[in-house]
Amino acid sequence: MQRLFFALWPGAALRRALYDLGQRMREEAGGRVVAANRIHMTLVFLGDIPVARTGELYAVGDALHAGKFELVLTQTGTWKRSAVGWIAPAMLPGALEQLVVAMRHHLLEAEFRIEQRPFTPHVTLLRDVRREVKARQTDVSYRWTVDKFSLVRSQTFPCGPVYTPLRTWRLDRTG
């Protein structure tokens, strides 16, 4: 078995800027800042999947055809229940919503179990937050040209999770 999810990964400069934002958010909310190399946006969490089914997930990625889009992250806050600090777009780009809907459709068609809760696009910047911070507008807009998505394996070690992209697809492909 392997723990898998589909995700968007920002480039190094944006990951660093978001890490720095997480450092500032920690001053108010407490908690642990997510390491820059772990910063991502989960599209669909799959959970534990048999290694033998990995090829089926590659086929799902191959079947998705979408254009690149811009994601503007402008809202920060914390969620008390999950104890995370996050940044998110104020508005969900139609292209992102279409990508996630198509991905979920193909996964269900391939008989994968997926979470049924609505997609809430966000990037986790803090874990184990101690104080709730209401959602608010950031001083700076964090612009992200999204031009690829990945299937990622998550492994947990004493030093924390390690995320390994298994395959990445470009978003400038057409069907």
Image (cartoon, rainbow, N blue to C red):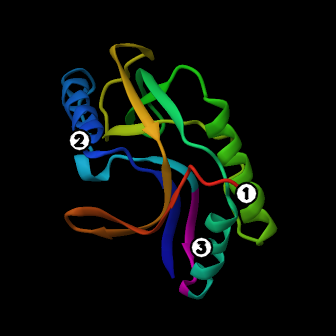
The answer to whether 163 is drawn above or below residue 11 in the figure is below
Residue 103 x/y as whole percent? 68, 55
Q: Residue furthest right?
A: 109
Q: Is residue 99 left or right of residue 77?
A: right
* Residue type (three-letter) at the residue carrying disc 2: Arg
Displayed quadrant of residue 161: bottom left
Q: Nearer the viewer, mark 1 or mark 2?
A: 1
Q: Which residue is mark 1?
A: 175
Displayed quadrant of residue 53: bottom right
* Residue type (three-letter) at the residue carrying disc 1: Gly
| Marker disc for residue 58 | 3
Residue 67 x/y as whole percent? 61, 44
Identify the image quadrant of the C terminus: bottom right
Q: Secondary structure at mark 3?
A: helix
| Marker disc for residue 141 | none
Does 26 lie within the magenta span? no
Residue drawn 55% across and 66% down?
47
* Residue type (three-letter) at the residue carrying disc 3: Tyr
Q: Is residue 168 left or right of residue 94?
A: left
What secondary structure do most residues of the magenta stretch adopt?
strand
Residue drawn 65% across and 48% down?
66
Residue 16 x/y as whole percent? 22, 38
Q: Which residue is mark 2?
A: 32
Q: Secondary structure at mark 1?
A: loop
The answer to whether 36 is drawn above or below residue 49 in the figure is above
* Front residue of this view, candidates 77 and 80: 77
Alpha-carbon distance for marks 3 and 2?
Answer: 33 Å
Q: Which residues are magenta?
A: 45-51
